[in-house]
Amino acid sequence: MSNTRSVLASSNSNLNGNPNSTSSTTTSLSKEEFSRNKIIEEIRDEYERKISAIVFCLQEKSEENTDLN
């Protein structure tokens, strides 16, 4: 599962095109920027859940195939 986390971490850092971005900033944001960032975070979370589910299914299939051999 640690591989999954590292893949997700790298994909999360690149979703908005800035690998150094963080969810907490000290600058003040306009309402539009805040809303945009919130939507991006929600989409990122949704994709993270989907990727985790796919990886889990692939791991199960891999284990099933190993058991068959």
Image (cartoon, rainbow, N blue to C red):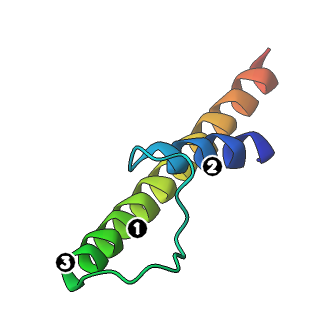
From the viewer's perspective, is residue 65 above or below residue 8? above
How many other residues sit within 10 Å of disc 3, few (<14), some (14-19) or many (≥20)? few
In this figure, what is the number of numbered marks? Answer: 3
Q: Position of residue 33 (x, y in %)?
A: 26, 74
Q: Residue at x 40, y 67 (%)?
A: 41
Relative vertical location of residue 37 with respect to residue 16 in this rendering, above or below: below
Residue type at numbered disc 1: Glu
Residue 9: which numbered mark, if any? 2
In the rendered structure, find residue 32 and report the number of the disc placed on it. Answer: 3
Q: Is residue 29 left or right of residue 55?
A: left
CB-based contact (under 8 Å), mark 3 and mark 2: no
Name the amino acid type tagged 2.
Answer: Ala
Residue 61 vs 33, above or below: the answer is above
Quadrant where the C terminus sits is: top right
Classify residue 38 as left or right of residue 65.
Answer: left
| 2 or 1: tag closer to the N-terminus | 2
